[in-house]
Image (cartoon, rainbow, N blue to C red):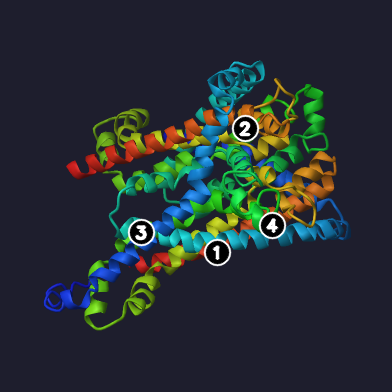
Amino acid sequence: MQKISIPWIVVFAHMFIILLLPLAALMLRAIVLNPAEFWALATTPIALSTYNITFGTAAIAGLVNMLAGTLTAWVLVRYQFPGKRFLDGIVDLPFALPTAVAGVTLATVYSQSGWLGQFFTPFGIQIAFSRVGVAIAMIFVSLPFVVRTVQPVLQEVEPTVEEAAWALGASRFQTFWKVILPPIIPAILTGTAQAFARAVGEFGSVVLVAANVPFQDLIAPVLVFQRLEQADIPGATVTGLVLLLISLMLLLIINLLQAWGRRYDA
Amino acid sequence: MTLNLDTHVPAVEPEIRPQAPQDWVKIGLIVLVFAFFAVILIVPVIYVFVGAFSNGLPGFLRTLSSREFLNALKLTLLAVVVAVPLNVIFGLCAALVIARKSFRGRTFLLSIIDLPFSISPVVAGLMLVSLYGRQGLLHPVLQTLDLRIIFAFPGIVLATILGGMPFVAREVIPVLEEIGDEEEEAARTLGANGWQTFWRVTLPSIRWALTYGIILTTARAMGEFGSIAIVSSNLIGRTQTLTLFVDSSYRNYDSQGAFATAVVLAGLAALTLVIKQVLEHFYSQRYKAK
């Protein structure tokens, strides 16, 4: 009996001290504010614009990753080509690379005279220190999700099923749309939701790439940081709690999507 | 229920498969993927190395031998040394509990352990400030004990532990579930106590997953930024970690210094991926051998 209790104690003590106690503290600090005050702080014009920019940009990043990630998974599963192992290996790089490193390098490479930014400057497009830069940082940090959720599922789809569709006279477009796509849709949506959730919470890379100007490219996590720096603790708490609740909601959606995906395992 | 229609297909297959256009589609898609990766990932990562050596090797070495860098390195390593073992012990215990016991709320416990992945690092930092900060719930207690957590080393450690909490459990649980508990059962029947069973039977079979989990935790600990930016006062030399050093050098227009530090962190990240590939290779070899 004793060997059971030691791991349990460790698990609960660690979880309680590191995660649950601070989580409860944040919620408690928000609850002690009266509802009117809470609502006022949560819906200041700056706060509303940060939600707008955060979710709008994260949605664009999610969409780009949905398409590019599915395509990458397809190419990695179905084709043989030189550099395949290299490509497969670097997919995980955004997870391993510290976000501050991603931030400084994206800000430099996409600056007006940077390696990639210079090609957009003649067209009057500014990437770093604008919302476009925020979108690129979000795409960068959430790039592995869709690839890594779709890849194993696509591996399970038998090429023989496709061949059967061809043999029965389906066009390539029909084969993709009606045979290949349906079983991988739950994986695509799960990966996209995970990428979106990650992009919404992203701080390190965005704070360095963006100019962090309200109404232009200031995102909600950076607003929390700025409010804390200005010792506006209630303001930071309220925005932080809004972000937390949205993360929990997204987590629930992701879990439901995963459960839906498991349907195909049977 | 695999749908195997192979026997019917061969006769018609060659006519139906449009070979040449297929190749163009294939090449086009591969080029598209590489172009996307180049713009988003490859070029920016290459630039980290170029930026680090923009003042040549002497400039690079000057940064790496500066006192600010060495202090930041020391602080990061200290945080890693404290945070990683605690997270590893927690992760192992959590994995054993979740994979080996059936109890109500098992899925719920799993989601709680995963929670730090879903929470924005800024919110994680804010949680710690709400508890230990100047207006935090525990502030009176900390004051009577004369303890400082926020704007000090303990805050950095707590933030680092929080960020890396789920990795080990996540890597180890699937392996424990896959290997089942027959061998552990046998060891116990033969008279091994819990500790011996864990040390001689369980641990050897999860060692690759555990190693990978430790590597991920360590990588995350070294790269932790958002939550540390919030709980640390960022006093140079006192509570500045490597990622905060990258940030502050960059903001102070010392981009060479920022990139020199970034290259150290990127090198460690690349190492993580190489070790991952090696471990996966080992694992699949062993799997095949069975």
**Dot 4 and dot 2 residues touching (CB under 8 Å):** no
Marks 4, 2 in one chain: no
Q: CA distance from mark 2 to mark 3?
A: 34 Å
Outermost residue to the bottom: A169
Answer with left or right where residue A155 lies relative to residue A55.
Answer: left
Q: CA distance from mark 4 to mark 2?
A: 32 Å
Query: Which corner quadrant holds the C terminus of chain B?
Result: top left
Inspect the image, locate mark 3, and give the three-letter code of the amino acid beneath it: Val
Please give left or right for residue B159 compared with residue B188 in the image: right
Q: Are marks 2 and 3 on the same chain?
A: no
Kindly check if marks 2 and 1 are in contact, taking CB atoms under 8 A apart as contact: no
Mark 3–mark 4 Cα distance, whole angstroms, equals 34 Å
Residue A13 visible to the viewer: no
Q: Chain of mark 3?
A: A
Closer-to-camera residue (A103/A59): A103
Give the residue number, with chain letter if any, for mark 4.
A124
Are the residues flagged by discs 3 and 4 from a single subunit? Answer: yes
Q: Which residue is mark 3?
A: A75
Would residue B245 be found to the left or right of residue B9 on screen?
right
Instruction: Specify which label sits upstream in the sequence, 1 or 4.
Output: 1
Residue A62 seen in this snapshot = yes
Residue placed under numbered mark 1 in the picture: A63
